[in-house]
Image: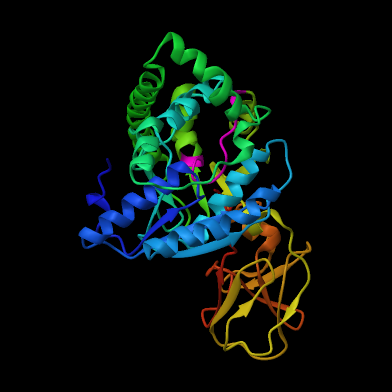
Amino acid sequence: MINLTPWLNAPAWHIAFSGGLDSTVLLHLLADYAHSHATPPLHAIHVHHGLQGAADTWPDHCKAVCERLGIELAVIRVQVASGPSLEQAARDARYAAFKRILGPGEVLFTGQHREDQAETLLFRLLRGAGLRGLSAMPEQRPLGQGRLVRPLLTTSRKQLHDYAQAHGLIWIEDPSNSDTTFARNFLRGEVFPLLQQRWPQASQNLARCAEHLGEAQGLLDELAEGDLAVAGEGAPDNWPGLDSLDLAPLVALSPARQRNALQYWLAPRTRLPDTRHWAGWADLRDAAVDARPVWQLTDGHLVRSHGRIWWLSGDWLQPVTGALCWGQPETPLSLPGNGRVQLQGHAHGDLHIAYRQGGEWLDVPGRGRRDLKRLLNELQVPHFVRPRLPLLYCGERLLAVANLPALGQADCQLHWQLPTNAQGLS
């Protein structure tokens, strides 16, 4: 029923085990395969959302099933954030838990089947999704440090049900699945039965359509990779860890290719904007040269500075203030919400780290006393970096500016490890 050969070299296998029909069959298939083949260690993960009283008994059921099969089970309790879509919030919490567990190269198997794929395509069609959304669920994709694999996507729910009955499997029936106030449940319970009465092959054909759309999306991804290879060149070395693109090569593309390249680049960083919000890209792209436009997206900001667009998220969205004494300059100094600094060379006296307030000046070797603002302009330091750029002082005297060797003495350089730019995308 499934092909597991491509994943035999993974350090470990995990299965998302809800206790329902799909994951129960998948767990049984994996356990049976592991008994007759040399496989990575197999672990089950049950995520408990705590959204309904009936769910409190499910971890015990899952434990009993795993004990019979000799499989280790981890039960993870998560908090589901409030929001307009409870389904999406629960999914986000679930996949965030999976990401935390997966180690490098490890595989998480999930039990989505052919009807799930067809429902996903129809659901996204009704929401007006673009080609990337209509590609529905890929058979595999990166997840955290590992990979998410859906080995049952070509298997029908009837095949899973028949397998479960033939092997005497017991599974949980989630009562919320019959609640048609949830959009997916309405499609599953009300719409698809009607479609399949008229077109018995509806699920199979829709799933095949998703495959075709996925292939088309793959070609667009290849085009995006080529476009981004050019736009990704020329990033300043001073700000490692900050993702940026050269604006000029993007502007030279047609609007459709611009959107395609940016969708590919943004997909691992944030939830993609819908059609209405792409006006934000045009505003950022076409703003005056001396403007500081910001395109606010779900999980971060896209900003423009010195001919490049930059992705900011995580700590970069929070301000930094204050000064920190550096009593032991021979050891790195952590900066709250702003990475850490390390002194390269020698400096003595009352050392501390501060941030720009305006009016700073610096003695530059061979140039004398210079206004710091002008110096930063000369070096084309991005405007969003300047407020959080660590400055090394000895008493009232500015000695060095982080990551800018020209703005410091040869024997006193300040190395700055930039703050995280992570967005925690599920």
Q: Name the one closer to the observer, 193 or 247.
A: 193
From the top left corner, tell me how far across and down residue 303 is, in percent.
Answer: 62, 43
Residue 185, above or below 108: above
In the rendered image, which quarter is residue 114 located in? top left
Residue 379 in view: no
**Left-right relation of 56 to 29:** right
Q: Position of residue 7 (x, y in %)?
A: 27, 53
The majority secondary structure of the magenta stretch comes to: loop
Identify the residue at image location x=48%, y=13%.
195
Q: Is residue 155 left or right of residue 373?
A: left
Q: Quadrant of residue 334?
A: bottom right
Q: Would residue 242 be visible to someone looking at this image?
A: yes
The x, y position of residue 170, in whole percent, is 46, 48
The one of 3 and 320 positioned closer to us in this rendering: 3
Looking at the picture, tell me which residue is in the foreground, 413 or 377: 413
Q: How is the image coloured?
A: rainbow
Image quadrant where one finds the N terminus: top left
Residue 66 higher or lower than 143, as above or below: below
Q: Vertical placement of 388 versus 425: above or below?
A: below
Residue 270 located within the stretch drawn in magenta: yes
- Span of residues in magenta: 265-275
Figure check: 106 above or below 296: below
